[in-house]
Amino acid sequence: MNFEALVSVIEQTHRHFQQQAVKAVNVSLTVRNWLVGFYIVEFEQKGEDRANYGVKLLDNLATKLNIKGLVSAELSRCRQFYLSYPHILGTLTQDFKNLVPSHILGTLSQESLTEDTLSFIDTSHTKSSSPDLVIPGEKLLSKLSYSHLVELIKIQDTLKRTFYEIECIKGTWSVRELKRQINSLYFERSGMSLNPELLSEITQQKIQPTSASEIIKSVYAFEFLGLKSKDAVEELDLETALLDHLQDFMLEMGHGFCLEARQKKILIGDEYFFIDLVFYHRILKCHVLVELKIEDFNHYNIGQLNTYVNYYKAEVMQKDDNPTIGILLVTNKNKALVEYATAGMDNQLFVSKYLVE
């Protein structure tokens, strides 16, 4: 070992344990806040002198505790956190339960979670909930920070919240990216709101996406480019802007997309053509060709993309690859025109709309 190797191994060791320490602190914070929420709900339901405090409970509690950070608003968040995720501690493995001292764990007996307490949880927004749509507490604690969970508890619909939990864990989203995806209506754009059975299977990790329709959105949000709809831009400018924001672009495309080429030159007969963007999808095991257009859908564009897809199938696709997928991104699409224009064409062609604001 030379000096540079010594420096390197110490740096790697430091980074590893620093990350572990941060993770441990976050898990402890999350568990603490869940417990705080649990105790507040328990008191509201069964406290001997609860009638003396009423709506001022959290204000009085924050004043009496005088703990930095546990102001009334934060106590309210802890309460909502528990109400949104009452199952967390009940689904932990022994390793995670060891984080909680035995004298505290003893207060969380099954007797504490009586029907009266559980009935206190507001179920008006959880009508779509199902035992199959519950992410285990251990995974939530190990994969999501408390800051992520604070954003998630703002989502009242259980199905929608579970969708964002899954996508956030799969994509290792930052809190900023989670907020962006929520604000850009990713759940609604994905079509998963119409297919809770599929979401249930994904939650239980029974399947990975097996078809193109499961990973391609009907609408893509490119608001991170900072463009306005009225701005006049060329297709190459749009492509450049997307690649200048590569991280945001890849996150918007979704889990599994790997960028392979830009302006990929291909030779068909004696003519050269250029494919805007070429991806390889590591889960579907196939190439995905993307054509960007700064105009409404027309049948010429889908014909162009169909040509590229057929070329890839004949000249590029390997024997262990699945059929190539084509995505045409346009500013607007006439659904009827899309149906007629693609009739008889490869069913691996998709037309999606994109938004820049």
Image (tube, helix red, strand yellow):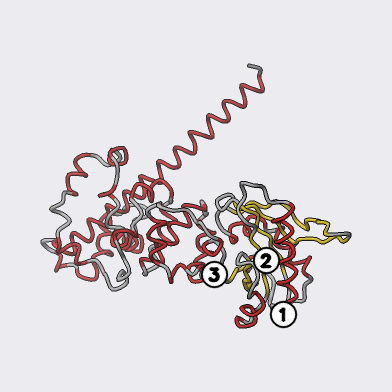
Q: Quadrant of residue 128?
A: bottom left
User: Which disc number belongs to residue 16?
Assistant: none
As helix, strand or loop, the secondary structure at mark 1 comes to: loop
Q: Nearer the viewer, residue 318 or 352?
A: 318
Name the outermost residue toward the left.
48
What amino acid is at disc 1? Answer: Lys
**At x 24% / y 69%, what residue is drawn?**
56
Q: Earlier in the sequence, mark 3 or mark 1?
A: 3
Q: Earlier in the sequence, mark 2 or mark 1?
A: 2
- Disc 2 to disc 3, how far (Cα)? 13 Å
| Badge 2 density bin: few <14, some 14–19, many ≥20, Cα 10 Å | some
Q: Nearer the viewer, residue 149 or 236?
A: 236
As helix, strand or loop, the secondary structure at mark 2 comes to: helix
Name the outermost residue toward the top.
1
What amino acid is at disc 2? Answer: Leu
**At x 31% / y 41%, what residue is drawn?**
96
Residue marked by disc 2: 225
Q: Quadrant of residue 243?
A: bottom right
User: Which disc number belongs to residue 184?
Assistant: 3
User: Which disc number belongs to residue 230?
Assistant: 1
- Disc 2 to disc 1, how far (Cα)? 14 Å
Do we see residue 355 in this rendering?
A: no
Instruction: Specify the quadrant that holds the C terminus.
Output: bottom right
What amino acid is at disc 3? Answer: Ser
Q: Nearer the viewer, residue 274 or 162?
A: 274
Q: In the displayed structure, does residue 7 sit left or right of residue 90?
A: right
Instruction: Specify the quadrant that holds the N terminus.
Output: top right
| Badge 3 density bin: few <14, some 14–19, many ≥20, Cα 10 Å | some
Q: Earlier in the sequence, mark 2 or mark 3?
A: 3
Residue 22, horizontal then vertical, whole percent: 45, 41
Circles 2 and 3: CB distance less than 8 Å?
A: no
**At x 43% / y 51%, what residue is drawn?**
144
